[in-house]
Image (cartoon, rainbow, N blue to C red):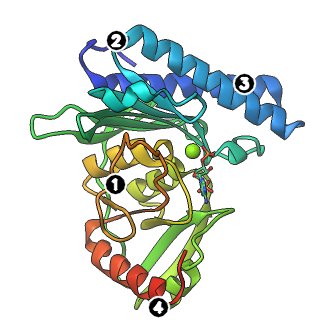
Amino acid sequence: MAPISESDDHALAAELATAAGEVLLGIRARVGHADGKALKDAGDQGSHEFLMAELAARRPGDAVLSEEGKDDPVRLGSDRVWIVDPLDGTREFSEEGRSDWAVHVALWERGRLAAGAVALPAQGRTLHTAADPAGARAVVTTGDGDSPLRAPAPEPGRLRIAVSRTRPPQFVQRLAELLEVKVELVPIGSAGAKISAVLLGDVDAYVHAGGQYEWDNAAPVAVAVAAGAHASRIDGAEPTYNQTDPLLPDILVCHPGSAPMLLAGIRDVKQDLPG
Ligand SMILES: Nc1ncnc2c1ncn2[C@@H]1O[C@H](COP(=O)(O)O)[C@@H](OP(=O)(O)O)[C@H]1O
Ligand SMILES: [Mg+2]
């Protein structure tokens, strides 16, 4: 990646997420898959330490909220907070051959997400926000360069919904039956990999409920919004970040044209079945 201007937070997010991904690929190659726990721990820690050191050097005045760090309350009085998940999809990272794991780097600034990057190291690409006169745009960077990223519309009559492999929402099967389109549930690891799959057109929506934290969805939501996607809580509310309690348990990302149908369907199934 080209050297960046010190003031370009979009480029810094992309650079750091991509570089942390390279750290993780190195750890995966060195530690191997024989001891899954050792690999997960090495990945979480190695990527966290890399990102903390880089952010301290490159943005010394900013606060950081990392899944792997001790939560420092100083972030609650800070204008700028980097919200990072050094390794999202830790389980999938430890499984040989899987590419559904990610590095998330987001910047929250005075009440809103200002930049974000989701690196998919085993897929060789990073989805990220980029500076634009009309606000942020979204870009996917690969070894071949940059391409613009816009959330595609689903094919009429069908909807592929990405869900957690291990903790799908309780209501999602009922939702699939209730919607008046042909629904396919697609289990994928990592919130970042699932939201990237929506933006790349591999699936049409991501529905999650039952538990998640700000670091799991801040960077993917920043990219999704810049790519023109709908991103909200499952009741339609805007997700808010840098809260005292970083629990952010549910999220919906899809093409804006699918949002009314999905929000209405979720509302209907949740009346019968909480969770
Ligand atoms: N019910 C739940 N409670 C807490 N965290 C959850 C959760 N369901 C998913 N997550 C977190 O959301 C991320 C994506 O999950 P999944 O792959 O199941 O979709 C994972 O992050 P980590 O891998 O960083 O721990 C996972 O821990
Ligand atoms: Mg995570």
Helix, strand or loop at label 2? It is loop
Residue 59 picture location, percent across and down: 36, 14
Q: Earlier in the sequence, mark 1 or mark 3?
A: 3
Q: Choose mark 1 or mark 2, whichever is in front.
A: 1
Q: Residues within 10 Å of mark 3 (few under 14, many from 20)?
A: some
- Image quadrant of ligand 2 equals top right
Whether residues under marks 1 and 3 lie with C-beta atoms below 8 angstroms apart, the answer is no
**Other residues around mark 2 within 10 Å, as few (<14) / some (14–19) / many (≥20):** few
Image disc number at residue 239? 1
Distance (Cα) linking label 4 and label 2: 50 Å
Residue 274 left/right relative to 229: right
> How many residues crowd around disc 4 within 10 Å: few (fewer than 14), some, or many (20 or more)?
some
Of badges 4 and 2, nearer the viewer stands: 4
Q: Residue at x 31, y 65 (%)?
A: 255
Circle 3 residue:
27
Q: Is mark 4 within 8 Å of ligand 1?
A: no
- Amino acid type shown at disc 2: Pro
